[in-house]
Image (cartoon, rainbow, N blue to C red):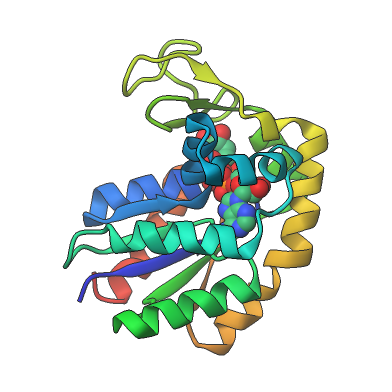
Amino acid sequence: MPLRLVLLGPPGAGKGTQAKRLCDRFGLIALSSGDILRAEIREGSEVGKKASQYVSAGTLVPDDVITAVMLVGIDKVPAGKGFILDGFPRTVPQAESLEQGFRSRGVAIAAVLDFNMDDRDIVQRIVNRRSCGKCNAVYNVAFLPPKQPDICDVCGSALVQRVDDREDVVTTRLKTYRAQTAPLVEFYRGRGLLRRIDASASADAVEAAARKIVESIGA
Ligand code: AP5
């Protein structure tokens, strides 16, 4: 059965970094709600216009907007292919809508990987993050730098800093996470799907822990 995973955890905990590694290793497709919203904002689409103010401020885009966008993304995944939801769901209503959407499609989540990390370390990761505006590859000038400064290793484009990676916005994002997303830990624990990961370790160590979990559920 195709593997369907959810990555849960605070901003900057390394969900996107590990989604990429797990997709490469297990042949999955990554559906990052943040990447999808940023692409919509760049294109100036209706969704992008609705989302822009929330993303820049570090607050959540309305549940109905993001849920519709993500279900469209899920329906585009080729039949028989597994996927990773990175950054979605982020509220209990989103998780309930996803559950309903999955039920009507006859599919289910295999596991929710819960990335745990202290807020202080998160800020250091985020303010040092640089992203490729073209292919979405992610680097960190302190911990995981590109081979050439400010140039993407994958596609050679210029690296940029996200508008929501300023320290003041990061503080809002962390508060938003603790208030609105952290309740999903109990939601998924109650369903027997939650698998905890220490996200403060090195990227290779986190990857090894995540791989072990995925292998244990039968990938
Ligand atoms: P989104 O893009 O999803 O942001 P996020 O959840 O805040 O997560 P990040 O992308 O900041 O971090 P990450 O955990 O992926 O870490 P990364 O791997 O990059 O969302 C942005 C906005 O969109 C939201 O604020 C909201 O407005 C909106 N939105 C999105 N989804 C929504 C939803 N479902 N509902 C409503 N609104 C929604 O790593 C971080 C840095 O650390 C990088 O520099 C990386 O190189 C480095 N790093 C990674 N792992 C390690 C490691 N182990 N050691 C050292 N450095 C590491």
Residue 119 or residue 205, whichever sits in front:
119
| Residue 41 vertical position relative to residue 209 in the rendered view, above or below | above
Quadrant holding ligand 1? Answer: top right
Residue for point 42% across, 31% down: 137
Question: Hey, which residue is sitting farthest front in the picture?
Answer: 46
Give the image quarter of residue 101: bottom left
Lateral position of residue 84 relative to residue 127, left or right: left
The quarter in which the N terminus is drawn is: bottom left
Residue 118 x/y as whole percent: 73, 53
Question: Hey, which residue is sitting farthest left in the picture?
Answer: 80
Residue 202 or residue 133, whichever sits in front:
133
Q: How many marks?
A: 0
Residue 152 x/y as whole percent: 40, 19
Q: Is residue 178 visible?
A: yes
Residue for point 38% across, 85% down: 103
Residue 157 or residue 106, whichever sits in front:
106
Residue 191 x/y as whole percent: 52, 88
| Residue 165 vertical position relative to residue 59 in the rendered view, above or below | above
Lateral position of residue 187 relative to residue 42, left or right: right
Residue 36 x/y as whole percent: 46, 45
| Residue 95 vertical position relative to residue 181 in the rendered view, above or below | below
Residue for point 23% across, 69% down: 219
Give the image quarter of residue 160: top right
Lateral position of residue 68 relative to residue 187, left or right: left
Q: Is residue 13 visible?
A: no
Lateral position of residue 73 relative to residue 186, left or right: left
